[in-house]
Amino acid sequence: MGTSLGAAAWMPLRLGGGPFRSRNALVRSCLKPENGGFGPRSFGIGERDGLIIVDHGSRRRESNLMLNEFVAMFRDKTGYPTVEPAHMELAEPSIKDAFSSCVRRGVTRVIVTPFFLFPGRHWHKDIPSLTAEAAKEHPGVSYIITAPLGLHELLVDVVNDRIKHCLSHVEGAADECEACVGTGKCRIY
């Protein structure tokens, strides 16, 4: 029969002028334990994994505190033991602080998850650079940077829910949401 994905990751691919048949084969090779990768384990979150949910960061304190609230909701809903907030810039904790916090808790793999909608410059350059710099202080701890939220069906529901809530607020049927509370921004202009 066929070969499992895990087994395929360890097969040498030397075809047609180069060692790798595809970019995915090259990536799988780079993820081997001897190359600082994750090795042949499940694709789930393990007890030696730590997550960092990183947003942009803001000069507005209330905005930064919302990431802490989201991280607490995420931790409660998923049951993952090590989930840390980080701000890319403008606020603390930084990616470096969050990475160190994960390592202090015994983590051997850090999963950095950008709390961004689309793959812009911050995802392509800034977050990888800041994460690599943080990882230098912790040899033997591997990391991965996941994709941003992107195009996902559930985001349609989230956006629609937010629109409906704001409209019901301006009609007097609902309180301000946690994003707008105290700002006076949720109104008809």
Image (spheres, grey):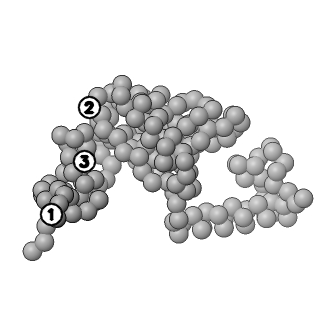
Q: Is residue 90 above or below residue 75?
A: above
Q: Residues within 10 Å of mark 2 (few under 14, many from 20)?
A: few
Is tag 3's residue or tag 2's residue first in the polypeptide sequence?
A: 3
Residue 76 visible in the displayed image: no
Q: Quadrant of the C terminus?
A: bottom right
Residue indicated by mark 3 = 30
Residue 128 lies, in percent from the top left, at: 44, 41
Between 109 and 71, which is closer to the camera in this rendering?
109
* Residue found at the far left of this picture: 1
Find residue 15 and name its label. 1
- Residue depicted at x 40% and y 35%: 132
Residue at the right extreme of this rendering: 189
Q: Earlier in the sequence, mark 1 or mark 2?
A: 1
Query: Which amino acid type is marked by label 2?
Result: Gly
Q: Which-is-in-front pick, marks 1 and 2?
A: 1
Mark 1–mark 2 Cα distance, whole angstroms, equals: 32 Å
The one nearer the camera, 113 or 8, is 8
* Residue for point 45% across, 54% down: 147
- Check contact, mark 3 vs mark 2: CB within 8 A: no
Dot 1 falls on a residue whose secondary structure is loop
Does dot 2 land on a helix, a strand or a loop? loop
- The mark that comes first in sequence, 1 or 3, is 1
Q: Relative to 94, is 13 on the left or the right? A: left
Q: From this viewpoint, is residue 161 visible? A: yes
The label on residue 140 is 2
Q: Nearer the viewer, mark 1 or mark 3?
A: 1
Image spot of residue 113 (x, y percent): 46, 47
